[in-house]
Image (spheres, rainbow, N blue to C red):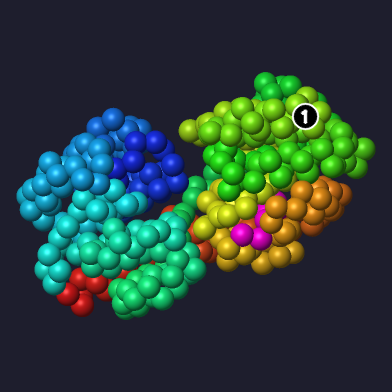
């Protein structure tokens, strides 16, 4: 048994916060002693299992000295073996003596400025590219681990459920459905996807084409205006940010990740977990996950016409989509399942403790 404390400061349920919830809950399900330290006003707390011990600390900013003192006091009282922090604020507010327990593990999901991370004792990057960056930046390779994210593997929805969701979104029975999920930010490439939809026209393979867009963010108004200018608004279904995007993955004949930059690409894993074929742009994260033509389809970044060509190619070839979906699901099961990732974390924790 390895006792661990997990600290996250974020209030919105972004990628890091959602993975924090998944990992903490999974450790509790493994009967590992786990303590969750998080903000009292965020959405994280409500998504943790009732059996998970929680302590709330404001962590309002990186210079929140009362919170830094409070975190130290909590850790001295509970004495975990491992303290894992997520993102910059929680990591900067956690300072533990080197060479002594507990061991501070900082998890990174991006190519961040390492000024606020170097004081940790060990580091987890969720892609190999991040780990290579950490090593190039002078951190010791023996204390770095590449451990990806895991996603749920839900059962397939019934035909009746799918038909009901289509009715709710006014999607014609004969229509082909594209789904995309993400924050409305320039790096996510949604403008490129809207342009690609305009290039495709109203039908593909003589069937209407509908794009379901799951998300929200600062570009909401400008993306809607762009869609109006392109004349494609009637083919879009804006469903907003969803805590449970499961139905929208299930509706997809093809899932699209049009990002201009993506460190990992959690939405790719989630689409694979739902057994959906994926078309993605050649970002670093997608290229690390995907073998083109085997488990997904890759197209150049920020090239709407190439994106449209890829969509048309896959929608015209149902057997190829089925193959991509099957191989993608298999990759998640073999490398990004809850069991695989939680075991990798526990193995890394044990290695650090043995070397201490």
Image location (x, y in percent) of residue 265: 55, 54
Above or below 168: residue 308: below
Q: Quadrant of the N terminus?
A: bottom left
Q: Please give left or right for residue 299 compared with residue 30 in the image.
A: right
Q: Residue at (71%, 65%) from the top-left corner?
A: 292
Mark 1 highlights which residue? 229
* Residue 254, quarter of picture: top right
Please name whichever residue, 84 or 159, is drawn nearer the observer in this view of the structure: 84
Image location (x, y in percent) of residue 78: 11, 51
Q: How many marks?
A: 1
Q: Please give left or right for residue 203 compared with residue 292 in the image.
A: right
Above or below 29: residue 169: above
* Residue range (magenta): 276-283
Image location (x, y in percent) of residue 9: 29, 43
Say which element carries label 1. helix
Q: Is residue 227 magenta?
A: no
Q: Is residue 277 magenta?
A: yes
């Amino acid at each position: 048994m390895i006792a661990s404390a997990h600290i996250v400061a974020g209030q919105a349920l972004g990628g890091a916060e959602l993975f924090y919830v998944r990992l903490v809950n999974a450790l509790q399900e493994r009967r590992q002693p786990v303590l969750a330290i998080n903000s009292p006003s965020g959405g994280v707390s409500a998504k943790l299992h009732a059996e998970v011990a929680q302590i709330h600390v404001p962590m309002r900013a990186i210079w929140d000295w009362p919170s830094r003192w409070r975190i130290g006091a909590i850790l001295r009282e509970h004495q975990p073996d491992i303290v894992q922090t997520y993102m910059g604020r929680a990591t900067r507010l956690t300072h533990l003596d080197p060479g002594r327990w507990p061991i501070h593990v900082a998890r990174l999901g991006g190519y961040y400025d390492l000024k606020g991370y170097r004081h940790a004792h060990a580091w987890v990057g969720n892609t190999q590219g991040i780990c290579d960056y950490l090593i190039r930046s002078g951190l010791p390779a023996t204390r770095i681990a590449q451990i990806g994210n895991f996603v749920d593997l839900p059962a397939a929805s019934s035909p009746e459920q799918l038909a009901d969701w289509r009715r709710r979104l006014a999607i014609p029975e004969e229509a082909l459905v594209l789904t995309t999920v993400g924050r409305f930010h320039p790096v996510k490439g949604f403008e490129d996807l809207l342009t690609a939809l305009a290039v495709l026209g109203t039908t593909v393979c003589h069937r209407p084409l509908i794009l379901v867009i799951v998300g929200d963010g600062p570009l909401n108004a400008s993306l809607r205006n762009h869609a109006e200018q392109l004349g494609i608004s009637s083919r879009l279904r804006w469903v907003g940010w969803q805590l449970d995007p499961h139905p929208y993955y299930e509706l997809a004949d093809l899932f699209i990740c049009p990002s201009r930059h993506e460190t990992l690409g959690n939405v790719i894993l989630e689409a694979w977990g739902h057994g959906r074929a994926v078309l993605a742009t050649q970002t670093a994260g997608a290229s690390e996950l995907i073998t083109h033509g085997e488990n997904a389809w890759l197209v150049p970044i920020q090239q709407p016409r190439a994106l449209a060509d890829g969509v048309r190619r896959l929608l015209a070839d149902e057997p190829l989509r089925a193959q991509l979906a099957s191989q993608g699901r298999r990759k998640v099961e073999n490398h990004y399942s809850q069991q695989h990732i939680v075991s990798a974390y526990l193995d890394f924790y044990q290695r650090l403790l043995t070397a201490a």
